[in-house]
Image (cartoon, helix red, strand yellow):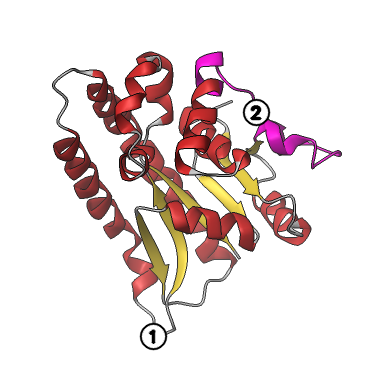
Amino acid sequence: MVKNMRGVVLFSPTDEVSESLKWLVERFKYRTLGVPPSLVERLPKLKRPLVPLAHPSRDVEAFVGFAADSMKLEREVAEAVCLASCYVSPLLALGPSAQRSLKDLAVGEVSSKVEMGVRDWKLHLRIADYSVLDLYEWSTTQAQKLWQRDANFEKLISERVTAIKKDQKRYWRLQRGELEPKTFLVYLDLVQSLHKAGALRSISEHDVDAVSACLAINVSVLVK
């Protein structure tokens, strides 16, 4: 499933996203798009390329609740962020409510100054996939150091900030225009967000092997 997946879809049940979802489905006819468990019932006619996701373990499901409570996030947002990490896929955020929630959670972003046609969207959705793949192994392995008794949280976070700044450079094509900048994607990092919420030390109460899979540096494309 991970090999064939090109993104995890997130939207708010209060937003109308049928047109955006239709556009996404047309772009990924031969791949799959994951739908988190809390949103599956909102799409009663679920069919490929949309596929339902599951929590890989009860430890991951428990961590989703912890993350939602610690950062005061909607359950579906915390779930989507964690599962996108577990399934090594970017988030694809549809609708203003979900996009607003993720922008509030973001630790970095990439803006576009160019008019994006279908070809540009396809290219940069693929580049977003590369961002996730290239950062995944390093960021999840690095996150396991949080469970060490002498963990230096500030040092670990500084390394993650540096990695994000380096990754942002791959989106240079979007900076070549003169239009008013619009957010194309945001970077998500639960390590930084939990630290900001004062909850990072509580992470040691959770299973390192399961939860570190939720702690990749990830991206979410704001589909407009």
Provide residue 107's location: percent of width, then percent of height: 35, 53
The residue closer to the viewer here, 151 or 141, is 151
Provide residue 36's location: percent of width, then percent of height: 65, 34
Q: Which residues are magenta?
A: 36-61
For label 1, the residue is: 178
Position of 140 relative to 12 (above/below): above
The residue that appears at 46% across and 67% down in the rendered structure is 183
Residue at the limit of the structure toward the bottom, as seen here: 178
In reply to whether residue 153 is colored magenta, the answer given is: no
Can residue 38 be seen?
A: yes
Provide residue 198's location: percent of width, then percent of height: 32, 39
User: Count of labels shown?
Assistant: 2
Q: Where, quadrant-wise, is the C terminus in this rendering?
A: bottom right
Amino acid at dot 1: Glu
Provide residue 104's location: percent of width, then percent of height: 46, 57
Crowding near pointer 2: few (<14 within 10 Å), some, many (20+)? many
43 horizontally vs 156: left or right = right
Amino acid at dot 2: Leu
Position of 84 relative to 119 (above/below): above
**Kind of element beneath mark 2:** loop
How far apart in space, not on screen, are marks 1 and 2 (Cα)? Answer: 40 Å
Q: Quadrant of residue 118?
A: bottom right
The residue closer to the viewer here, 133 or 67, is 67
The residue that appears at 62% across and 40% down in the rendered structure is 76
| Chain-order first, disc 1 or disc 2 | 2
Crowding near pointer 1: few (<14 within 10 Å), some, many (20+)? few
Q: Where, quadrant-wise, is the N terminus in this rendering?
A: top right
Can residue 3 be seen?
A: no
Mark number for residue 58?
Answer: none
Mark number for residue 53?
Answer: 2
The residue closer to the viewer here, 204 or 170, is 204
